[in-house]
Image: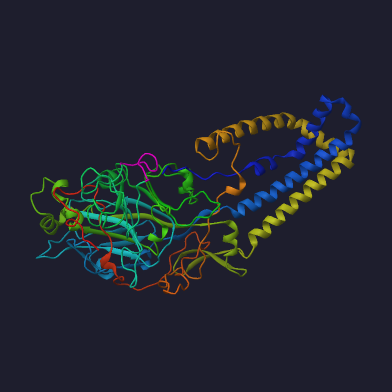
């Protein structure tokens, strides 16, 4: 399954309608008469007709521009987590580690008492205990947090300055869905990045129920990384996401290795980087954008400018570093639903424990003994998050429609008790656009009328055109349009958007992806067996600094002991399908 690149857009209408035809019309008519002297007698008719058509074309172009701008779906930020109140929007999991790690997950109060947590505008830090020797069979203190909001798609941007690194450590940033009626892996798991020990790369992995296969996804075609994780045979690729897939380690899932320096000591030495996970869960008949999950890693300083400007356009970023199809022939999109974000750091367990000797051969202790008795070895085992933003796709029309009512609307929510006021959002954008178009149309109409009725105005316009060298500019623009058309056509052919004989793609195929609309951003529970309304989902807002809602309470999440396992980029020698990872 080759990734076809960004969807193709038909731009001919705007391309040709927005050229300032009224200013060049006189020159064009003059050239026409010079080439055909027989038209001199019909001079007023030719000139007026051309000017009228130019005016109509310009007006149509302006209206089309406003309409297209209002309809095109782009990602807009709906949640920005990093700030002093970061932990308010997360539940602290304090139960037993479902992956059998040598760890004690602490509450928020314990984390603050042990100086494992800190949050400010500049970043969030989550540490593990690096001062205490653990007695007996206990585990090292660490943090696992789960977002109070659940998601059914979106763009998740995570910027890190430091990731946990140590022999025996197993950190991950991931998403999963479950509740009391839907046990993991019914609603799936998306490990955006995880790693073990001192590895200098992260792995992106899916864990699902049966019937989620990625056999049609290929390295260096659909994604660019270090390839697929290896299955239990040692030579096969782990492309089956089912947690009980044959010829894979139990709970392995389907994993793809991200590039070198995407984790570990190399990542921290380079100053960190940014991970972007896109979960595209919607597809329309007229849209070429497929359902998928894909991930990019950008080293620090190499982030795309649109991402830095918080106006991300992933289709412009090239081939991702991981890619999973949600196309119905291979893995239907309903394998993933109502997923929460999770940060955690555990130790040893099913994944890091079984690979400890292979990755840290200089240590002559078991993984568990090393973790309990060497606190100083975990000084670098901490998360430093500088950005965690969630984006959803919206059009400008939807943004305006969802704006609050009233003359004084708080548009930007900064943090508790502090807001800034914005203009009335109830149709304000549409009103301004209409007024602008009316003014432009009136100005163009007035110019057209006086140009043909008033010799003085006509002389001034012609004098200005000559002084401004508009005829030369006209020829330059026409030549430039020709070159641009050729370049655009060639680019579209290279991307596979049009065939060798096509000039551009049909306007009917332009992408229009739907936006989820609901009155609440909290998950309210699963649908009834009789097919009641689906769970309500997050409703996008205008806020550039909007904090997530305060749904839920602190404590253990329902069914949390059933989630998350490693991706096992390689398995331990002698491991079997039912021995290295816990079955579900």
Q: Residue most toward the left?
A: 364
Residue 198 lies, in percent from the top left, at: 21, 47
Q: Give how far across and how far down residue 167 sits, in percent.
A: 18, 51
Residue 204 higher or lower than 411, as above or below = above
Please provide the residue range marked out in magenta.
216-226
Q: Position of residue 407 (x, y in %)?
A: 62, 68
Left or right of 401, for residue 339: left
Q: Is residue 164 magenta?
A: no
Q: Nearer the viewer, residue 343 or 424?
A: 343
In this rendering, position of residue 565 left or right of residue 389? left
Q: How many numbered callouts?
A: 0
Task: Tell me where residue 360 appears, x and y as whole percent.
Answer: 15, 47
Q: Is residue 485 above or below residue 69?
A: above
* Horizontal side of residue 143 vs 395, given as left or right: left
Residues 142 and 557: in front is 557
Visual colour scheme: rainbow
- The residue closer to the viewer here, 442 or 178, is 178
Name the residue: 16% across, 49% down: 572
Within the image, what quadrant is residue 53 found in?
top right
Figure check: 104 above or below 493: below
Quarter of the image containing the N terminus?
top left
Q: Looking at the image, which residue is at 55% across and 36% down?
A: 499
Asked whether residue 127 is in view, the answer is no
* 40 lies left or right of 149: right
Q: Is residue 331 at all visible to an observer of this figure?
A: yes
Could you tell me which quadrant the C terminus lies in? bottom left
Residue at image location 37% in from the left, 39% down from the top:
220
Specify the principal SS of the magenta part: loop
The answer to if 220 sits in the magenta stretch is: yes
């Amino acid at each position: 399954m080759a990734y076809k690149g960004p969807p193709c857009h038909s731009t001919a209408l705007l391309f040709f309608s927005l050229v300032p035809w009224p200013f060049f019309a006189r020159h064009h008519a003059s050239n026409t008469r010079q080439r055909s002297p027989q038209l001199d007698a019909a001079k007023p008719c030719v000139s007026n007709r051309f000017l009228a058509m130019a005016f109509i074309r310009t007006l149509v172009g302006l209206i089309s521009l406003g309409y297209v701008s209002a309809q095109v779906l782009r990602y807009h930020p709906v949640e920005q987590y990093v700030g002093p109140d970061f932990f308010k929007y997360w539940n602290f999991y304090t139960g037993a580690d479902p992956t059998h790690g040598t760890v004690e997950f602490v509450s928020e109060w314990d984390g603050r008492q042990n100086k494992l947590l800190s949050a400010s505008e500049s970043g969030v830090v989550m540490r593990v205990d690096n001062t205490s020797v653990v007695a007996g069979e206990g585990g090292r203190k660490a943090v696992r947090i789960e977002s109070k909001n659940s998601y059914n798609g979106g763009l998740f941007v995570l910027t890190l300055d430091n990731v946990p690194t140590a022999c025996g450590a197993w950190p991950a940033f991931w998403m999963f869905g479950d509740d009391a009626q839907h046990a993991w892996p019914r609603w799936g798991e998306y490990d955006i990045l995880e790693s073990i020990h001192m590895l200098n790369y992260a792995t992106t992995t899916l864990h699902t129920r049966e019937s989620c296969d990625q056999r049609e996804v290929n390295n260096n075609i659909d994604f660019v990384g270090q390839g697929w994780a290896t299955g239990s045979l040692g030579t096969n690729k782990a492309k089956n996401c089912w947690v009980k897939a044959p010829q894979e380690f139990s709970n392995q899932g389907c994993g793809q290795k991200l590039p070198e320096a995407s984790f570990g000591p190399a990542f921290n030495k380079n100053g960190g980087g940014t991970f972007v996970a896109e979960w595209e869960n919607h597809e329309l008949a007229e849209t070429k954008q497929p359902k998928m999950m894909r991930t990019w890693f950008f080293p620090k300083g190499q982030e795309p400018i649109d991402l830095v400007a918080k106006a991300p356009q992933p289709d412009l970023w090239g081939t991702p570093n991981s890619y999973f199809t949600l196309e119905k022939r291979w893995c239907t999109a309903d394998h993933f639903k109502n997923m929460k974000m999770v940060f955690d750091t555990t130790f040893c367990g099913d994944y890091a424990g079984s690979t400890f000797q292979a990755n840290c051969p200089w240590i002559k202790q078991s993984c568990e003994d090393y973790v309990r008795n060497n606190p100083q070895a975990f000084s670098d085992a901490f998360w430093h998050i500088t950005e965690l933003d969630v984006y959803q796709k919206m059009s400008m029309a939807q943004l305006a429609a969802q704006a609050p009512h009233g003359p004084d609307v708080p548009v930007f929510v900064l943090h508790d008790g502090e807001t800034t006021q914005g203009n009335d959002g109830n149709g304000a954008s549409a009103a301004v656009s209409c007024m602008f178009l009316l003014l432009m149309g009136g100005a163009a109409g007035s110019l057209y009328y006086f140009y043909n009725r008033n010799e003085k105005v006509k002389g001034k316009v012609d004098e200005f055109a000559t002084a401004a060298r508009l005829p030369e500019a006209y020829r330059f623009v026409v030549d430039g349009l020709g070159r641009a058309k050729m370049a655009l056509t060639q680019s579209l052919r290279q991307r596979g958007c049009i065939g060798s004989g096509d000039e551009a793609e049909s306007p009917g195929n332009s992408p229009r992806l739907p936006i989820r609309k609901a009155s609440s951003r909290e998950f309210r529970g699963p649908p009834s067996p009789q097919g009641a309304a689906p769970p309500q989902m997050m409703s996008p807002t205008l806020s550039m600094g909007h904090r997530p809602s305060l749904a839920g309470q602190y404590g253990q999440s329902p069914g949390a002991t059933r989630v998350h396992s490693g991706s096992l980029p390689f398995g331990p020698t002698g491991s079997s399908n039912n021995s290295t990872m816990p079955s579900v």
